Amino acid sequence: MTSTVAVSGIGGPRLTLGFDRFDRLDLDRHLAVHGKLRAPSLDELVRACEQVDLRGRGGAGFPFARKLMAVAARVRYPTTDPPPLLPGEKRDARGSSEDVVVVVNGAEGEPGSAKDKVLLGRAPHLVLDGAQIAASAIGTQRIVVAVEDDEAARSVRAAIVERRMPARIVRLTDRFISGESGAVVRAINGEAPIPPGVKVRASESGVDGYPTLLSNTETFAQLAVLVSLGPDLYASTGTEEEPGTTLLTVGGTQVVEAPLGTPLQAVLDHCQVPPSPGVLVGGYHGMWLGPAQVSRAVLSRAGMRRVGGTVGAGIILPLTQGTCPLGEVTRIASYLAAQSAGQCGPCRLGLPDVVRSLNSLTEGGGSVEDVRRAAGVGRGRGACTHPDGTARFVLSAMEAFGPDIDAHRWGGGCGLSTYGVLPLPIPDGTEGRVAIDWSRCDGHGLCAYLVPELIQLDRYGFPVVLGTDIPSWMEKDVQKAVAMCPALALRVVAGVPDISSRRG
């Protein structure tokens, strides 16, 4: 994966230092490039992180110093035995610092992102430096690196052996929701790798129930750079409010290190991206920007907010001229609906309704209001951030692609094909979809009762199938529906190509 991704930079390299000379920095090369880092105390590390306002680079942008302090606060009795329990009192998850776990979240289930795989594949020791710095400050040696990419796993394993480091690697399932912090913790604990359904702070109860410092791969690499340079030199690039650099994945194929505060258009020009009808920033839970917004956008949290965008996990996906924007949005929304964990109504029923409303709008029979109503079900709701993020993606498209949507509404289509320029995972042959044998179907409607998420009835009582892959959590329900179909008309077929190349 990382060998096919082009890496470059705007301004001086930090995270990508040495990439111009080495394909991968083993321990000797890493020490020659970055040097041996000291281990600051917890107070020193917290002050340094606060001074430069170091934020997580996984999408949420949570202050790293607050994570450090939250985990440290759970270590109530670092050197002495805890007091005896009162009658009826239970011991909570707090304990000695040796119980604390540091987790490097290397999950990158987002199809358009490659920055963390690049770091783990080419600069694994920089990431491990950051993890060790944090672990040392908290007083633990328990480090877990969670990865889903084969090449990244091999690279990290080799680095751990070189360092003789007491760390372990946990392999994750390659799914869109696998990178959510709760899903990562569950995977490490040997549970189903999906969000837990309720908000549980890892700092309170994470791996094995112990306080856990969990952050994104780039965040730990940034931490190592911060300790190496010191806060003042670290803040010599970027903006005054948001110093430092960040890694961006552009178009799913290029990784760029750029100072925060760099104009978005400068990044697109650097990557030789031609003029685009729209640019998605922040990935598939992000927002669409039109050409006018792109021209004003600055790569910082404040700069993106001013134009209605987000930096998120640093994913930038330009739309190619000549492809149908609404078709591309519908294609990704279908993928996101199939990627849900199915733990709540906004995912189970809300996301399929979003896809149905988009299909109807694409075919000229629906309205923007129908899409907004369907997407609104997921806003601020759900057992995890998936329905809310999907709704944000869809609703921003309704604002960014007004002329194309009008062409579909009033002309039945825009005349453009959907070429599938937005990246999706390569099918592995295990995908399945629901299909109807129309020579047998006589409209009993039982299938719509058994799997309403995938099948609804038209006004004549015949099934209308949602054209998405069957989510893993629905496989048993679908098998039951197939077995119970009175006419034996319902079946599961191999996943078919998406709507790429269809006319808009």
Image (cartoon, rainbow, N blue to C red):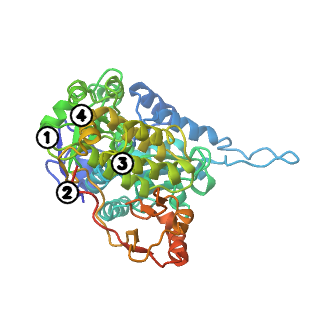
Residue at mark 4 to residue at mark 2: CA–CA distance: 20 Å
Residue under the image location 32 percent in, 70 percent down: 428
Work out how far the residue at label 2 is from the one at label 1, CA to CA, in angstroms.
22 Å
The disc labelled 2 sits on which kind of residue?
A: Ser
The amino acid type of the residue labelled 1 equals: Val
Q: How far apart, in angstroms, are the residues tagged by discs 3 and 2?
A: 18 Å
CA separation in Å, label 4 and label 3? 17 Å
Q: Residue furthest top?
A: 240
In the image, is residue 370 above or below residue 243? below
Q: Secondary structure at mark 4?
A: helix
Q: In the rendered structure, which disc, 3 or 2, sits on the residue that comes first in sequence?
A: 3
Q: CA distance from mark 1 to mark 4?
A: 22 Å
Q: Determine whether label 4 and label 2 are within 8 Å by CB.
A: no
Which is in the foreground here, disc 1 or disc 3?
3
Q: Which of pointers 4 and 3 indicates the residue nearer the eye?
A: 3
Tell me which numbered mark, 4 or 2, is placed earlier along the sequence.
Answer: 4
Q: Which residue is mark 1?
A: 273
Discs 1, 4 touching: Cβ within 8 Å? no
Q: Residue furthest right?
A: 87
Residue at the disc numbered 3: 360
Q: Amino acid at mark 4?
A: Pro
- Point out the frontmost of discs 4 and 2: 4
454 vs 321, nearest the viewer: 454
User: How crowded is the residue under tag 1: few (<14 C-alpha within 10 Å), some, or many (20+)?
Assistant: some
Residue underneath mark 2: 501
